[in-house]
Image (cartoon, helix red, strand yellow):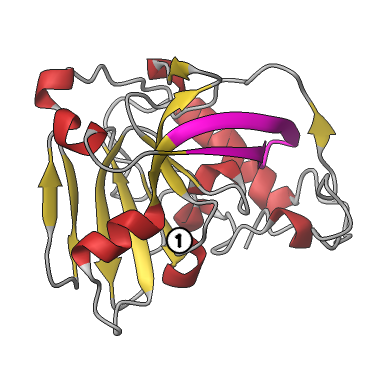
């Protein structure tokens, strides 16, 4: 495994997922237009919310929660949980799509919009990438323009309840236009970067972009 493998991960699971990428498992070879097709290629609808992680579900003490937003920015932030919760909140309804082939429609969220955070820290024009760092050591990368969208949030509530630990609470990323592995759980740091930095799954055969309608499961 690469040197960045977090301690305590389920190595058997990781090896299995790498084989999926090598074999192109679940690929249908088709694409779709999200403006006309709601369910991306190869996906199936579920009504529950399956739990997927690296075998680690960190316990985050609310008193020790910290969210850093930094990198190539004018005003880096380091927020306690109460400071995060004091930011302007908004409600959102969106679908989510997991690379393991399930999708769930009409999820109700509450959280802080990415654009609120962007306005707060003022990234440099040179910062074209955003890297998410999670408490468990997980990382994933997106383009800045993918993060800077009206439906992207840092969410703390799902269906009117605090997001559970198993789903990434107390705060996780929500990027509904991309496969769910890009929506990092247990978020610890948001880094605005000049250069791209492929994350945990991207270094293990997953696509660097992750658009469900283009079926960008693997790279």
**Camera-side residue of 53 and 183:** 183
Q: Which residue is mark 1?
A: 147
Q: Quadrant of residue 42?
A: top right
Q: Position of residue 180 (x, y in %)?
A: 57, 42
Q: Residue at x 53, y 28 (%)?
A: 13
Q: Position of residue 139 (x, y in %)?
A: 35, 48
Residue 34 drawn above or below residue 185? below
Q: Is residue 126 left or right of residue 215?
A: left
Q: Residue at x 76, y 62 (%)?
A: 214
In the rendered view of the protein, which quadrant contains the C terminus?
Answer: bottom right
Residue 101 part of the magenta segment: yes
Q: Position of residue 97 (x, y in %)?
A: 68, 40
Q: Quadrant of residue 162?
A: top left
In the rendered view of the protein, which quadrant contains the N terminus?
Answer: top left
Q: Secondary structure at mark 1?
A: helix
**Camera-side residue of 112 and 7:** 112
| Predominant SS of the magenta segment | strand
Q: Residue at x 55, y 51 (%)?
A: 151
Residue 217 part of the magenta segment: no
**Camera-side residue of 98 and 19:** 98
Q: Quadrant of residue 114?
A: bottom left
Q: Which residues are magenta?
A: 91-110
Q: Residue at x 38, y 59 (%)?
A: 115
């Amino acid at each position: 495994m690469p040197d960045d493998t977090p301690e305590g991960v389920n190595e058997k699971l990781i090896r299995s997922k790498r084989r999926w990428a090598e074999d192109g498992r679940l690929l249908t070879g088709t694409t779709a237009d999200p403006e006309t097709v709601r369910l991306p290629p190869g996906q199936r609808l579920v009504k529950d919310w399956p739990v997927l992680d690296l075998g680690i579900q960190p316990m985050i003490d609310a008193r020790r929660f910290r969210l850093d937003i930094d990198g190539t920015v004018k005003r880096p932030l380091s927020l306690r949980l109460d400071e995060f919760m004091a930011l302007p909140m908004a409600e959102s309804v969106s679908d989510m799509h997991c690379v393991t082939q399930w999708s769930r429609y009409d999820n109700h969220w509450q959280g802080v919009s990415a654009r609120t955070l962007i306005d707060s820290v003022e990234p440099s024009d040179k910062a074209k990438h955003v890297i998410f760092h999670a408490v468990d050591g997980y990382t994933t990368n997106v383009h800045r323009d993918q993060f800077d969208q009206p439906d992207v949030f840092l969410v703390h509530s799902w269906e009117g309840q605090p997001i559970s630990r198993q789903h990434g609470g107390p705060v996780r990323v929500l990027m509904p236009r991309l496969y769910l592995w890009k929506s990092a759980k247990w978020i610890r740091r948001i880094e605005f970067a000049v250069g791209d930095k492929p994350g945990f799954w991207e270094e293990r055969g997953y696509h660097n972009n992750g658009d469900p309608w283009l079926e960008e499961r693997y790279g």
